[in-house]
Amino acid sequence: MTYPTVIVSGVSVRVDSEGRYCLNDLHAAAVLNGEATESQKPSKFIRSASVQRFVKALDARGQKRPLEHNQSLKVIRGGDSQSVWGVEMIAVRYAAWIKPEFEIDVYNTFIESRTRALDILNQLNRLDHLIGGETKDISQCASKMGKWGKGGRKALLNEARKNLIDQLDPDMVSLMEGKVA
C-alpha cells in the first residue's frame, strides 16, 4: 500500500511502508516555521510518561498489528538514519506537544491529504467504470462481427433470403433481380 507524503510548512514529511510519519521531519517543519525549538525534538517527546502511556494504549487497542515492525511508534537509534516514526495519531499528538497552532496545521494537512486521495480514488473508480462499460460494448460488437462473417449470421440470413426467393414465381424473381441489379 502506498501512503501519502505530506508537505508541512514547506518540508516533505516522509512516510514509511507501515504508514508511520517521520516525527523528525515534523520537527524540522516546525523549526523552519518558527513554531518549535531544538529542545522539542521527537526523542524528548517520546520519553514523556503520558506519551508512553498513549502509545501503549494505541498498541493495546489494535491500532497496529502486534508485530514489531508494525508498531504505532518506531525509534531508529544511532547512525545516519536516526529518527522517530509514529502513526498519524502520534504525529498529531507530537505537533500538539510542540504548539497548538502547529497541531492545527498538521491536522489540516493530514485531512487535506486524505481528502485529495479520496478525490483521486473517486475519479479512478469513475474511469474504471467507463473503461469497463466500453470494453463490454466493444466485446459485444466484436462478438457480433465474428458471428456475422463466413459461416455465421450473414450466411444464415443469405440462406433465408435464398429460400424466400425459391418460393417466388420465377418471373417475379427476374423482375426483382432486374430492379436490384
Image (cartoon, grey):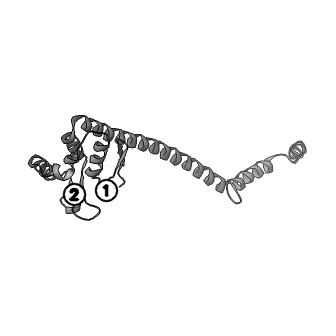
Q: Tally the marks.
A: 2
Which x, y percent locates residue 174?
89, 46
Q: Which mark is residue 74?
A: 2
SS category of the residue bearing label 1: loop
Task: Check disc 2: other Cα within 10 Å, few if <14, some if 14-19, many if 20+.
Answer: some
Residue type, numbered disc 2: Lys
Q: Is 72 left, or right, of 121 in this rendering?
A: left
Relative depth, front residue between 60 and 144: 60
- What's the distance in space between the residues labelled 2 and 1, CA to CA? 10 Å
Query: Residue at coordinates 71% horizontally, 53% vertically from top-left?
Result: 154
Relative depth, front residue between 11 and 39: 39
Q: Which mark is residue 16?
A: 1
> Where is the N terminus found, in terms of image quarters?
bottom left
Query: Residue at coordinates 56% horizontally, 46% vertically from top-left?
Result: 134
* Depicted 130 relative to depicted 85: above or below: above
Residue type, numbered disc 1: Asp
Q: Quadrant of residue 18?
A: bottom left
Q: Is 50 left, or right, of 111 in this rendering?
A: left
SS category of the residue bearing label 2: strand
